[in-house]
Image: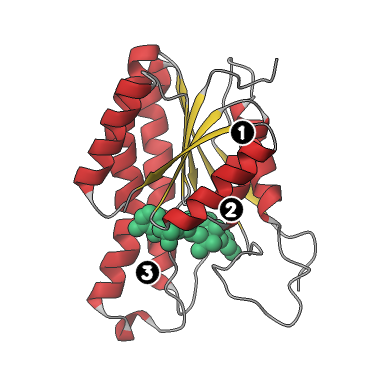
Amino acid sequence: MAELTEQIAIVTGAGRGIGEAISKRLAALGATVVLVARNTARLAQVKREIENAGGRAETASVDLLHEGAIDTLAGFIKVRHGRCDILVNNAGIGAMGKPLHETAPGIWDAVMATNLRAPFLMIRALAPLMIAASRGHIINISSLAGHNPLRNGAAYAASKWGLNGLTYSVAEELRDFGIRVSAVAPGSVHTEFGGSGADDSWKIQPEDVANIVAMIVTQSPHSFVSEVLVRPARKR
Ligand SMILES: NC(=O)c1ccc[n+]([C@@H]2O[C@H](COP(=O)([O-])OP(=O)(O)OC[C@H]3O[C@@H](n4cnc5c(N)ncnc54)[C@H](OP(=O)(O)O)[C@@H]3O)[C@@H](O)[C@H]2O)c1
């Protein structure tokens, strides 16, 4: 039997990039994966590919900026599955290229709402299901930009520094309930997020991040991984 059989995993930003790779990996391990993002066509495509590979997936078109939509999703998960074993808060947006003093407040708000408020809302909505079951994994996809200064990307860096603080703090709140909360902090990953350059072969692959998530959710029950920093093997 696959290691995650009968488990329900929710992955945000599952329509492409890192979230797609994580979803496929968790499905290959036997989980039923709820694919969350806004673009329904991309979600349907990922669902098809998971099913063609013998896995199970469902789609949920949700804009994570809307608290009500997140609460509706959590209600749906409760009624349909009655459990949430794994929550991967992966959806995120960048805002690079300008110093902070030239950054519009609307850009700041969008970055914070997507990268920091949405993981808060997802945890708020879904932790009760995990608490009821006395088990669960929450994995927040952070960034090395959550550890380092990022010139011309201060809003993004601040959101990921914030996400790390949220992760470590919530881990303390939930560990007594059997819920393990972790962060994964990659460097540059080859996705649409950072655009493409002349040679992207040096970048981390989305599947590399998925491997780390798979390792975290199959960790023995006596311990948990607080954070994994993932770097490209060679610099560009
Ligand atoms: N790529 C990198 O170099 C890198 C490095 C370190 C960390 N990260 C982090 O890794 C995560 C995934 O990045 P990625 O490279 O895979 O990015 P990506 O290819 O741009 O994918 C982002 C995903 O997030 C979803 N999303 C964005 N805003 C959303 C919203 N309001 N509601 C619902 N879904 C939303 C997008 O789907 P829709 O547009 O369809 O909603 C998409 O599926 C992000 O948190 C990013 O900060 C990336």
Gap in Å between the C-alphas at discs 2 and 1? 14 Å
Q: Nearer the viewer, mark 2 or mark 1?
A: 1
Mark 2 — residue? Answer: 18
Q: Earlier in the sequence, mark 2 or mark 3?
A: 2
Residue 118 is left or right of residue 153, and the answer is left
Q: Earlier in the sequence, mark 1 or mark 3?
A: 1
Gap in Å between the C-alphas at discs 1 and 3? 33 Å
Q: Residue at x 38, y 16 (%)?
A: 177
Q: Which mark is residue 155?
A: 3
Q: Residues within 10 Å of mark 1 (few under 14, many from 20)?
A: many
Work out whether 180 lies above or below 111.
above
Q: Nearer the viewer, mark 1 or mark 3?
A: 1
**Label 2: element kind:** helix
- Between 31 and 220, the residue placed more toward the observer is 31
Q: Residue at x 47, y 52 (%)?
A: 13
Q: Is mark 2 within 8 Å of ligand 1?
A: yes
Q: Which mark is residue 27?
A: 1
Q: Is mark 1 within 8 Å of ligand 1?
A: no
**Label 3: element kind:** helix
- Between 56 and 224, the residue placed more toward the observer is 56
Could you tell me residue 210's position as x and y percent? 65, 44
- Between 225 and 124, the residue placed more toward the observer is 124
- Quadrant containing the C terminus is bottom right
Residue 167 occupies quadrant: top left
Could you tell me residue 65's position as x and y percent? 27, 55
Q: Amino acid at mark 1?
A: Ala
Q: Amino acid at mark 2?
A: Ile
